[in-house]
Image: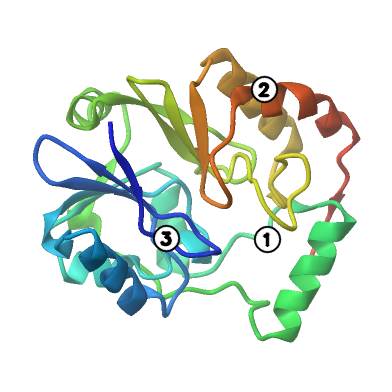
């Protein structure tokens, strides 16, 4: 299956061809919509061809221009039940903390550049949502030719997608770029749940892991770094 990345140096926005239309995995920061459209055009993709948006979780760098995509397409948003209220708020949850001092420093730098509030335009489009539950899940997985997986820890509403070829789109359950260290995400709401998510991802035996930040990597990277989670200390921003 062909995977197209129409993201930028900060965010990956994966596009996957479906039997009808395309799946988009997440949007990016507010203000990035016009550049997103340009990158779609480079791949000869019309935004109206996007049939589904898989929202891996509600953070400003994942839902930042969700409204614009919905305004310019008929796409349905596939999301965790807990994501609905988070979208309405238009601000990241500050439950949990930074996963280390380097991450804390990074968040401090973001604040200096006016990005410390972590806000995004609120989204309240229930008529466009496919909220995942026992009833909706089988039909969604059939449309996507994959398995939706709950990946809590980074956030309570984190989900991912495992395709039939073993490709795992993990959102921010793992990262592969500065200021992340050893594939550990830089923000963790629940460290206990986050450890379980890494164990779950390893148990899936993915052929390749596609994070929302950084290049794809192998499951061996998780295997050699999972022990580091026992030493992670969270630093609150409150």
Which residue is pictured at 43% across the width and 57% down the height?
Answer: 85
- How many labels sit on residues? 3
According to the image, what is the colour scheme of the structure? Answer: rainbow
Query: In terms of sequence position, does the residue under pointer 3 or pointer 1 come before the other?
Result: 3
Alpha carbon of mark 3 to alpha carbon of mark 2: how far?
A: 25 Å
Alpha carbon of mark 2 to alpha carbon of mark 1: how far?
A: 31 Å
Query: In terms of sequence position, does the residue under pointer 3 or pointer 2 come before the other?
Result: 3
On the image, which quarter does residue 75 sit in? bottom left
User: Residue 159, relative to residue 207: is it above or below?
Assistant: below
Check disc 3 and report the residue beneath it: 7
Label 3 crowd (10 A; few <14 / some 14-19 / many >=20): many
Residue 224 vs residue 27, the one in the foreground = 224
Which residue is pictured at 90% across the width and 35% down the height?
Answer: 231
Q: Secondary structure under badge 1?
A: loop
Q: Secondary structure under badge 3?
A: loop
- Judge depth for marks 2 and 1 and give the one in front: 2
Residue 238 shows up from this direction? no
- Judge depth for marks 3 and 1 and give the one in front: 3
Q: Secondary structure under badge 2?
A: helix
Query: In terms of sequence position, does the residue under pointer 2 or pointer 1 come before the other?
Result: 1
Check disc 2 and report the residue beneath it: 220
Query: From the viewer's perspective, is 188 left or right of 235?
Result: left
Q: Which residue lies furthest to the front in this view?
A: 42
| Quadrant of the drawing holding the N terminus | top left
Label 2 crowd (10 A; few <14 / some 14-19 / many >=20): few
Check disc 1 and report the residue beneath it: 94
Q: Give x and y (percent) for residue 165.
A: 35, 20
Alpha carbon of mark 3 to alpha carbon of mark 1: how far?
A: 25 Å
The reply to whether the C-beta atoms of the residues labelled 3 and 1 are less than 8 Å apart is no
Which residue is pictured at 43% across the width and 69% down the height?
Answer: 64
Query: From the viewer's perspective, is 60 left or right of 148?
Result: right
């Amino acid at each position: 299956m062909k995977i197209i990345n129409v993201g930028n140096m900060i965010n990956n926005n994966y596009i996957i061809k479906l039997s009808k239309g395309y799946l988009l995995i997440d949007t990016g920061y507010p203000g990035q919509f016009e550049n997103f459209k340009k990158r779609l055009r480079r791949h000869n993709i019309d935004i109206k061809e996007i049939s589904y948006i898989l929202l891996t979780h509600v953070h400003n760098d994942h839902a930042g221009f969700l409204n614009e995509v919905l305004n310019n397409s008929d796409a349905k948003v596939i999301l965790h039940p807990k994501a609905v209220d988070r979208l309405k708020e238009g601000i990241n949850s500050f439950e949990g903390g930074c996963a280390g001092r380097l991450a804390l420093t990074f968040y401090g730098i973001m604040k200096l550049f006016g990005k410390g509030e972590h806000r995004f335009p609120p989204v309240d489009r229930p008529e466009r949502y496919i909220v995942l539950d026992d009833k909706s899940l089988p039909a969604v997985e059939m449309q996507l030719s994959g398995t939706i997986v709950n990946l809590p820890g980074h956030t309570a509403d984190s989900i991912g997608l495992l395709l039939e070829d073993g490709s795992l789109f993990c959102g921010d359950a793992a990262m592969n770029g500065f200021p992340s260290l050893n594939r550990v995400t830089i923000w963790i709401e629940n460290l206990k749940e986050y450890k379980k998510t890494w164990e779950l991802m390893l148990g899936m035996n993915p052929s390749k892991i596609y994070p929302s930040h950084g290049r794809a990597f192998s499951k061996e990277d998780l295997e050699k770094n999972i022990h580091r989670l026992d030493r992670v200390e969270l630093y609150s921003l409150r």
